[in-house]
Amino acid sequence: MAQLQVSTVHSFCERVLRQHAVEADIDPDFSVLADDEVELLRKQAINLAFAEMAATEASWLEAMPRYTRLDLQQYLKSRIRQAQHPTFCAQPEMHGRGKPTGRLAAIG
Amino acid sequence: MDLVWQQYAKAHPNLSDSMDWLEAYGGPGQSPIWGAEDKLGQQMVPSHLAVQAIKDRNWTAAVEVLHQECMARKQGGAKSQWHSEGAILSARQHVGNVRNALVFLRKQEFSSHPDPHAPEAARAVRIWLELWHKALAHYTRLKQERLGVDYDDLEILALDLMQKGRAEPGSRVGRFVSGIRQVLADEHQDINPVQQQIIDTLAPIESPGRLFVVGDTKQSIYRFRQAQVTAFTELAVKLRKETGFEETTLASSFRTQKPLVAATNHLFNHVLTPVIGEEFASFEAKHTAANLRYKTLAQPNCLCGTAHCAKTGFGIDRGRTEAR
């Protein structure tokens, strides 16, 4: 029987992935991160990277005199986005298709 | 450098012909052939200058020519400009010989004058790469710990899944994908290329009658989510070319007023660049009962007031106005 299903692109994607979690190689209990949560996680990830860098190389920030810590943070944030989203390949500075990084452990 | 150049010239006997040929070039408009203004023609002046620089032994100036955008192209040449296929081929050959020589010179330039800042730069690049890999790895881990996916992951994973389904029609995903008979997409101006690919997979335009899209380029607001307004206009062009269907323009607005629409049309003619060969349709405000009432009540010419007016009792039938 014909049915009409109305949803946003994202909720459609979410539904399809949950219904075909095994084929999509994703945990069916996945949660969709809200924009502010994503922002927070990216910031956290970048700060962890800074901390690790500082632990191994004391004067790492001085090696890049043109950038402040904040510049680097913002630039890295947009890069994470670009690496994930193949759309950015349309822009001249990116080459190759970014791999999705959100792939979760397969169940079973 | 002189010696290196002589060796190169000796190893490439065609080069001196090409240099002579380009040196004889007197600039645009000097002869009918030299007037060519296509992509190949644009390379003529820089190539000519490069030859002169080489003859003056000014290697730096010669290599700098390569930075010009037009020199990045290897092809080009329009028959309407060059009059014959032979003229295009020989020009392409000569320009190509000189370009190869310049590329060789550039390599030599770099190796003969090492940059004193190179070690510092190399360190900065290494640190930058390390930071980047660490940050990305942490972000991935943090997401995995929460079993979380962001919106980008959702789109990319769903697209992969559906493409898999298309490739294997007998599979469970395949049956799901082919079970979707029609796709109706609203606000299509805010689509990003991955979402467009999802729609392409669900409703390929080759199979007629499966795709219906509505959008308004003037309302694109999701650029920060990689929405590309050009994707929408390109889809319209593609549909027309491949299926012969013409899009329908809904240019009449029943819920606003003429001065506002005129201002919008005026503004967007400057703001949006039409796709080549495509014009943005101007909107038109239709005279409605709502508009009349606005006028008699001497309201400002702006529909932003609709909700407000309804509240303050000016009697605008909000439901009816918006529904139209």
Image (cartoon, rainbow, N blue to C red):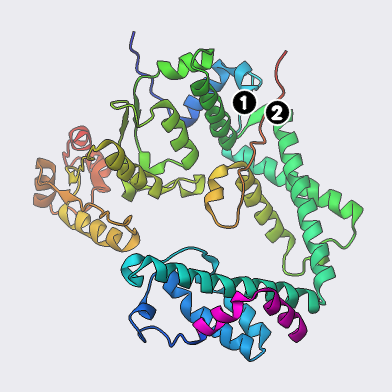
Q: What amino acid type is highlighted by mark number 1?
A: Ser
Give neighbour class at mark 2: few <14, some 14-19, many 20+ (Cα, 10 Å).
Answer: few
- Discs 2, 1 touching: Cβ within 8 Å: yes
For the residues labelled 2 and 1, the Cα–Cα distance comes to 8 Å
Q: Main secondary structure of the magenta part?
A: helix
Q: Is residue A29 magenta?
A: no
B50 w.r.t. A99: above or below: below
Task: Tell me, yes or no, if residue A15 can be seen here.
Answer: no
The residue marked by circle 2 belongs to what chain?
Answer: B
Per the rendering, the mark at residue B286 is: none
Which residue does the image show at 90% across and 57% down from the upper left?
Answer: A57
Which residue does the image show at 70% across and 78% down from the upper left?
Answer: B10
Identify the magenta region. Answer: B1-22
Which residue is labeled 2 in the image? B146
Which residue is labeled 1 in the image? A31
Which of B252 and B246 lies nearest the eye of the viewer?
B246
- In the image: residue A15, left or right of residue B32: right
- Using the rendered view, name the quadrant where residue A66 is placed: bottom right
Q: What amino acid type is highlighted by mark number 2?
A: Arg
A52 w.r.t. B28: above or below: above
Picture coordinates of residue B28, whole percent (x, y): 39, 83
Picture coordinates of residue A22, whole percent (x, y): 63, 16
- In the image: residue A58, left or right of residue B290: right
Residue furthest out toward the bottom = B56
